[in-house]
Structure formats: structure tokens, C-alpha cells
Image (spheres, rainbow, N blue to C red):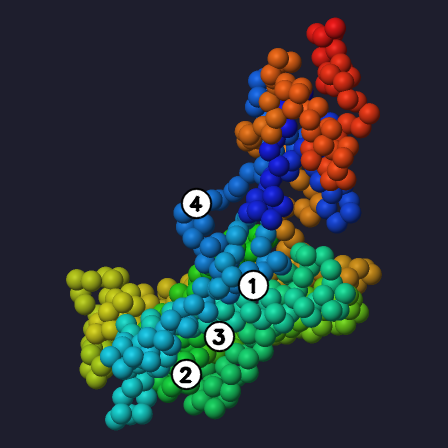
């Protein structure tokens, strides 16, 4: 008798990874969405003896950090049937990490003795009653951590309970399209709130439409509450993106996007700590505006509105060119041409005593020390300008590369195609690589036995009971009641007269 791997429950954690062979049927890859999988290889192989090898997909990048990041995002709000990739094989818990942390924090805040510490997660720190503004310091990380948790929970909740049901109601049934629509929809929601907020801060500021005023009155390390909350929230968002980008399906420009998020996070944090929140506000306004139109165009594409999608893509393209290839280079130029006119030297303490010359025995470290030491002097000179200019120029190079992809899409639309994101997934939707699979040993369900080990009398008693009962109790062989016919069914008739 053939050895069969033990059946595995379809409700178990490995239901997407392990396929079980049926009795007497050669098994190949399962169908997906009604179509046969292109990988036409057996789901199991048999070795000599009682060993059966079951085909399982290989796992990639399963390091400790990768696993921790996957677990964090998978448990961001709760169990979801839509946002678990089959390759990740994640078993979500019903109560989300974000909700648990927020609830635990509010519970601790209800205790009077703990409020001195928990209040740092909810409020802006370092308020100066004399100036009515806020300074900065290490306690700001409490609020940043709180923003990351809240944004993570909001992202998961909006995607799962708002955007995914909306996509299904509009006729989107493919799981991958629902996930993509929800991801882009969340970006649209986020930037639709923070871009107008950034524009409001810029419009009501003293540096509105003036590149020179970006650098005046430096170092202005104190800011009003709205500017501080806006900057910390934006920093938290990009720090969270560093986790999310390693969870979602990778695209061809994964490392460009990853580098973009690192550089953007570094620039926001450095601008906040070094007293350059004015230019930070301007750059975020220029960058965020295009992130409204592009997700909107993608959402329209997934919903099937091809014509409106193409129109919105054209609006996005024009907005991208104006914001990122006209206004943003102007800001980069101002860093090179105007900064040293208004900023030069070092200022010490919260009273900003200065300017003083940079430390003679500390060539580079004094520039970065304010990033972790609030009491360290803040300095600006040629070295700082060159580093600042270099990071912004790197962002410009990335935007040029992406604009090249945008032009390719535009040419495709002009030729009669549709506006689609050229940043496709690394792995095709319906093509699987045999090298992506391995075979693992499975426990057999049945073992080969000799004829002497078969309990025929016990079998006859079961058959007799089966005839008297309408309920099947085991293997049913109607019409075969003698031993010889039973042995003939299992291929042992030559051994018994």
C-alpha cells in the first residue's frame, strides 16, 4: 500500500504552505483563482521506506530583524484575511499590538503616580512659559513612539475596515489588488491631511515665499506647538515606513525607496535638532503634494476607472515636475548660496550664546553632536553646508530617476495604453520558480504491513455491523464478506488459498 503523508487541517497555520497528496492521484501545484499554477511539479515525492517528502515554499530573508519587523506589522491591529502574504506565513493574533499598547498606556495614565511619566507620550515636552514656545530634548522620543504606534494602528484599521471593504464593494475581488488599493488609499488619506497642514504652517509663517527668510534668525531651536507636533508626526511617519516597506511585497525600486525614507528621516530629524525647521517645512510641502495625486491615480486604476486614472496621472506628472524639479532645486540652490550669509559659527546653551568659532580640535563631530546632546553647541559652516547640500542633492537624483519612469508611463498613455505603475513586483503574479521550493519530510499516514498482521476477524465484525447500521464506521467494501475476497482487494490473494 502506498505511503501517504498525514493530512493537515486547512485551518492550521501552514494551510498555505503545505499541500497533501490524495489517494492514488499524482499531485501537481494547486489552482489559483481557477487557473492552474504554472509550476507543474509534484506536491510530494516518495523515498525508499516509509518517508514522504512534501513540497513547501522556501522562506527568504528570515533573519531575526526581518522576523521581528514582520511580527510587528502583522500584529499592528488584529487578524486580517487580506493583508497576510502567503510567503510570510504569519498567524495573526485577534487583539492588535497597537490597540493593546494604547489601551495599556491610557490605563497607566489613570494612575496619579504614573502620570508624570505617561504624560510624556501624550503632550509636547519642554514648554517655555517665558516665550510661549517649545524647546527640544530627549523626552521628544516618547511622543515619537506614541505617534508610530498610533499611525500603525490607524493604517491597519483604515486599510482593513474601510478601504478593503470599499474595494470589494466596487467590484475588486483579486486579493492582491485589494491589498494594493488599500495601501495606496492609506497614503492618500495621510497626505491629504498632512500636506494641507504643512501648507497652512508655511502660508502663515514669516518665511512664506522668501528663500532668504528661511535662514534668518538662526538658530531658532524654539518653535510653536503646531510646528513641533507637525515635525515629530512627519518624522514618526517616515520611521514607520522603514518598517512597512520591508513587509509589503517588494518592488523593483525597493532599495531606492528604502534609501529615500532613510535620507528623509535623517533630514527631518537633523533639521529639528539643529534649528532648521523652516526649510524642513518647505521641503515637506514640496515633497508631499505629489504623494496625493499619485496614490489617487493608482486607486482609480484598481477600481477600473482607466480614463479618470489617466487624467489624474497627467495632473500628478505636472505637479511632480513643478514641485520637485523647479521649486525643490531652488531650495537646494538656496542652501548653497544663501546659508552662509546668515548662518556661520557656533552657539552654546539654551540661551544660544554666540556666535563662536568651531572647536579647533574637533573637525567633524561637533556638527553631529546636537543630534543626541541637547546641550551641545549648534554650528553652521562650510562643512555643514556641504553635507546638507549633498543629502538634498541625493534626493534630487532619486526624483530624476523616478521621473524617468513617469515619462515612460506617459509615453505608453500617448500610444494608447493605460497609466500603470512601472515599478512591478519582483515576482510575477502567476509564475512560480521551481527553485523557490524545497521538500521536507512528512509523517506517513499509513505504513506497509504483512498479511499476518491483518486482523480479518475484526474486519468481518465491522462489516457485519455496517450492514446493520446506516452509519459508516470505516472502510466500506459492500459485497465482500469472505477473507479471500478481502485479501484479493489488497493484492494478497496469492498468499492465501
Q: Where is residue 320 in the image (x, y as percent from the top left)?
A: 62, 71
Above or below, comparing residue 95 to residue 44 in the picture: below
Distance between mark 4 and mark 1 Cα atoms:
31 Å
Distance between mark 1 and mark 2 Cα atoms:
26 Å
Q: Nearer the viewer, mark 4 or mark 1?
A: 4
Q: Which residue is found at the position 45% from the left and 64% from the top?
A: 97
Distance between mark 2 and mark 3 Cα atoms:
14 Å
**Disc assigned to residue 63:** 4
The residue lying toward the viewer, choosing from 384 and 176, is 176
Looking at marks 2 and 4 on the same chain, the residue that comes earlier in the sequence is marked by 4
Question: Which element carries disc 1, helix, strand or loop?
Answer: helix
Q: Where is residue 288 in the image (x, y as percent from the top left)?
A: 55, 73
**Disc assigned to residue 283:** 3
The residue lying toward the viewer, choosing from 241 and 252, is 241
Q: Which residue is found at the position 69% from the left and 59% from the top?
A: 177
Q: Which residue is found at the position 62% from the left and 37% from the top?
A: 7
Looking at marks 1 and 2 on the same chain, the residue that comes earlier in the sequence is marked by 2
Looking at marks 4 and 1 on the same chain, the residue that comes earlier in the sequence is marked by 4
Looking at marks 3 and 1 on the same chain, the residue that comes earlier in the sequence is marked by 3
Q: Which residue is found at the position 22% from the left and 81% from the top?
A: 350
* Image side of residue 167 versus residue 347, left or right: right
Question: Which element carries disc 2, helix, strand or loop?
Answer: helix
Amino acid at each position: 500500500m502506498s505511503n501517504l503523508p498525514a493530512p493537515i487541517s486547512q485551518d492550521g497555520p501552514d494551510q498555505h504552505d503545505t499541500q497533501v497528496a490524495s489517494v492514488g492521484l499524482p499531485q501537481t501545484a494547486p489552482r489559483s483563482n481557477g487557473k492552474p499554477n504554472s509550476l507543474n511539479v509534484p506536491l510530494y515525492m516518495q523515498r525508499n521506506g516509509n518517508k514522504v517528502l512534501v513540497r513547501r515554499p522556501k522562506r527568504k530573508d528570515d533573519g531575526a530583524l526581518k522576523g521581528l519587523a514582520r511580527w510587528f506589522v502583522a500584529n499592528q491591529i488584529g487578524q486580517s484575511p487580506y493583508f497576510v502574504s502567503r510567503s510570510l506565513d504569519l498567524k495573526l493574533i485577534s487583539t492588535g499590538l497597537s490597540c493593546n499598547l494604547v489601551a495599556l498606556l491610557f490605563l497607566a495614565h489613570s494612575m496619579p503616580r504614573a502620570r508624570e511619566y505617561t504624560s510624556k507620550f501624550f503632550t509636547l515636552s519642554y514648554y517655555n512659559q517665558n516665550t510661549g514656545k517649545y524647546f527640544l530634548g530627549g523626552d521628544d522620543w516618547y511622543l515619537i513612539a506614541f505617534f508610530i504606534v498610533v499611525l500603525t494602528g490607524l493604517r491597519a484599521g483604515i486599510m482593513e475596515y474601510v478601504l478593503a471593504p470599499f474595494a470589494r464593494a466596487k467590484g475588486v475581488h483579486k486579493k492582491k489588488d485589494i491589498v494594493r488599493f488599500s495601501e495606496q488609499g492609506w497614503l492618500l488619506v495621510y497626505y491629504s491631511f498632512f500636506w494641507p497642514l504643512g501648507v497652512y504652517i508655511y502660508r502663515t509663517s514669516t518665511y512664506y515665499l522668501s528663500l532668504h527668510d528661511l535662514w534668518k534668525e538662526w538658530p531658532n531651536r524654539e518653535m510653536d506647538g503646531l510646528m513641533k507636533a507637525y515635525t515629530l508626526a512627519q518624522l514618526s511617519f517616515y520611521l514607520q515606513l522603514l518598517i512597512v516597506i520591508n513587509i509589503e511585497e517588494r518592488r523593483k525600486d525597493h532599495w531606492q525607496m528604502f534609501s529615500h525614507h532613510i535620507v528623509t528621516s535623517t533630514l527631518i530629524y537633523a533639521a529639528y535638532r539643529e534649528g532648521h525647521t523652516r526649510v524642513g517645512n518647505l521641503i515637506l510641502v514640496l515633497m508631499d503634494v505629489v504623494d496625493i495625486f499619485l496614490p489617487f491615480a493608482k486607486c482609480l486604476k484598481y477600481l477600473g476607472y482607466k480614463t479618470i486614472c489617466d487624467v489624474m496621472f497627467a495632473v500628478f506628472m505636472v505637479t511632480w515636475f513643478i514641485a520637485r524639479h523647479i521649486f525643490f532645486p531652488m531650495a537646494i540652490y538656496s542652501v548653497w548660496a544663501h546659508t552662509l550669509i546668515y548662518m556661520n559659527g557656533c552657539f552654546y546653551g539654551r540661551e544660544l550664546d554666540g556666535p563662536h568659532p568651531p572647536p579647533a580640535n574637533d573637525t567633524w563631530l561637533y556638527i553631529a553632536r546636537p543630534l543626541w546632546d541637547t546641550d551641545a553647541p549648534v554650528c553652521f559652516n562650510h562643512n555643514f553646508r556641504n553635507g546638507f547640500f549633498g543629502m538634498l542633492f541625493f534626493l534630487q537624483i532619486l526624483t530624476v530617476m523616478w521621473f524617468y519612469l513617469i515619462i515612460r508611463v506617459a509615453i505608453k498613455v500617448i500610444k494608447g495604453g493605460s497609466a500603470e505603475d512601472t515599478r512591478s513586483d519582483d515576482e510575477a503574479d502567476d509564475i512560480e520558480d521551481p527553485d523557490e521550493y524545497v521538500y521536507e519530510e512528512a509523517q506517513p499516514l499509513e505504513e506497509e504491513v504483512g498479511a499476518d498482521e491483518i486482523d480479518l476477524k475484526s474486519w468481518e465484525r465491522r462489516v457485519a455491523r455496517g450492514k446493520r447500521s446506516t452509519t459508516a464506521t470505516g472502510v466500506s467494501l459492500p459485497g465482500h464478506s469472505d477473507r479471500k475476497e478481502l485479501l484479493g482487494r489488497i493484492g494478497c490473494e496469492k498468499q492465501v488459498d
